[in-house]
Amino acid sequence: MSGSKPAGVEQIFGHIDPDAMKVVRRLLQAGHEAYLVGGCVRDLYLGRSPKDFDVATSATPEAIRKAFRNSRVIGRRFKLAHVFFGPKIIETSTFRTAPQQADDDDPLITHDNEWGTVEDDARRRDFTINGLFYDVESRRVVDFVDGIEDLDRGVVRTIGDPVLRFREDPVRMIRAIKFAARLDFEIEPTTWQALLEVAPDIVRSSRARLLEEIYKLLRSGASRRCFELLLSAGLLHRIMPDYTGQFGRREDGAEALRAGLDPASAPLEDTDADDDDADDDAARLLWRFLDALDDYIRQTREDVVNGVLQAVLFAPLVADEMLHGSRQELDRAIELVMTPVGAAFGVARRDRELARQILMAHRRMTDQRRRRRRSSLAQRQYFHDALIFLGISVKALGDDQGELSRWKALAAAQDEPAPPPAKAGEKAGEKSGRKRSRRRRSGRRPKKADGEGREAAPSHDG
């Protein structure tokens, strides 16, 4: 069951994002049907804070675009509108019906732009807990798929035949695992059996979508549980064969990863130096790093950047070089383990480079002989991300907190504003209140080169 008690329908209205409410109300005033939909309704019912708010409506994407100047239509396979309020996006989609099956009897969805009713839209969604709509006028949840019952029971269940739903879109298997892990729910037995049956179809999904889902799992605050379920379902090695294969010469690395989950397995410092033990060490480290990442995300609620996530994934595979090797050895090891995975997934070059910089910086940050050169590293653009990774690594490896505390202190010192320079005839640290006071009364501003004296106009949300 869920770790949080359901808040219930009556608690939803007071926690709705005001910009999402504006979108719904404007669409209603224009004569369209409009509801909050999906994950935001689910999370509000469970007493959780939604990461974002989505709207479903009878208005077409073009009609939504005309209703909101601060919007744009995106997508081809699944066309919808983004309504912008500053950096915030309210995703607004048109009610859809299930797409017609192709003549070749292949259920894989390649386009999804056939409009329908609100009930059609509910029944074409993936899981019952995501098929809920909230009517802001009557303040009630509209439930065509028994989603409230499954939320109360703590169950992830597909809407309709699970085998068909997973074959329509194999990425739904990863989403089922994400919701089960993040909400601490169970996957309903029939749905789980279908997932095991359809698992080989995951390779039909685009690599870009799979990579994005892996990032979502890592950011979920339940990445360890997600990866455990991926491993149990036979999905992990199919999604990331170039990655899992590096955890052992035995088959696809799955055996070593399963062994790393065993709490009775030997601690890292007690293993021998042969290849099999090295594989088991790397596997145990992966689970420790995922645990530490989850702790960090749950405590800070921070959106960790992709480069840090990549560093977490690859640190177990280069741990020996990261802690004991030379700079050249670490650089070669990083290149060796990251290149095949990055090429297979199409990982962005900037993310791979940031992960490499973080892992290289970790070696320097934990080398006590290099303390005199700390300030230069603290000024690097990637320093903040390297500091996040250092905290995750210290927890995963069980290292002493001393180095982490020293780097945090240095980071805090770097963030402090520098004192203004002393003026002529003034001693350092003294303030000339009289002169500042006269300047304020006169209303004059000091001139700056290149027109920098002009004040920036305040920004406003759309």
Image: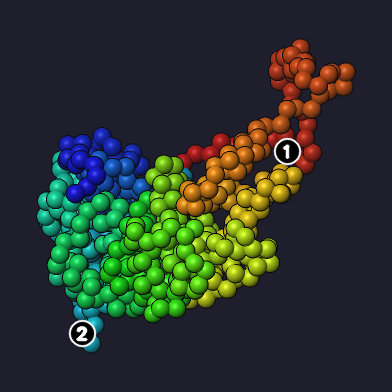
Q: Does residue 161 appear in this view? A: yes
**Mark 1 surroundings: few (<14), some (14-19) or many (≥20) residues within 10 A:** few
Q: Which residue sits at x=17%, y=40%?
A: 8
Chain-order first, disc 1 or disc 2 = 2
Near-viewer residue (161 or 462): 161
Q: Mark 2 points at which residue?
A: 105
Q: Distance between the residues labelled 1 and 2?
A: 65 Å
Report helix, strand or loop for mark 1: loop
The residue that disc 1 covers is 452
The front one of 336 and 219 is 336
The amino acid sitting under disc 1 is Glu
Query: Would you call the spot at circle 2 few (<14 residues within 10 Å), some (14-19), or many (20 or more)?
Result: few
Identity of the residue drawn at 21% across and 76% down: 197
Depth check: 21 or 338 in front? Answer: 338
Whether residue 294 is situated above or below residue 187 in the rendered picture: above
The answer to whether 295 appears left or right of 427 in the picture is: left
379 above or below 345?
above
Q: Is residue 346 left or right of residue 456?
A: left
Tell me if 417 is positioned left or right of 421 in this view: left
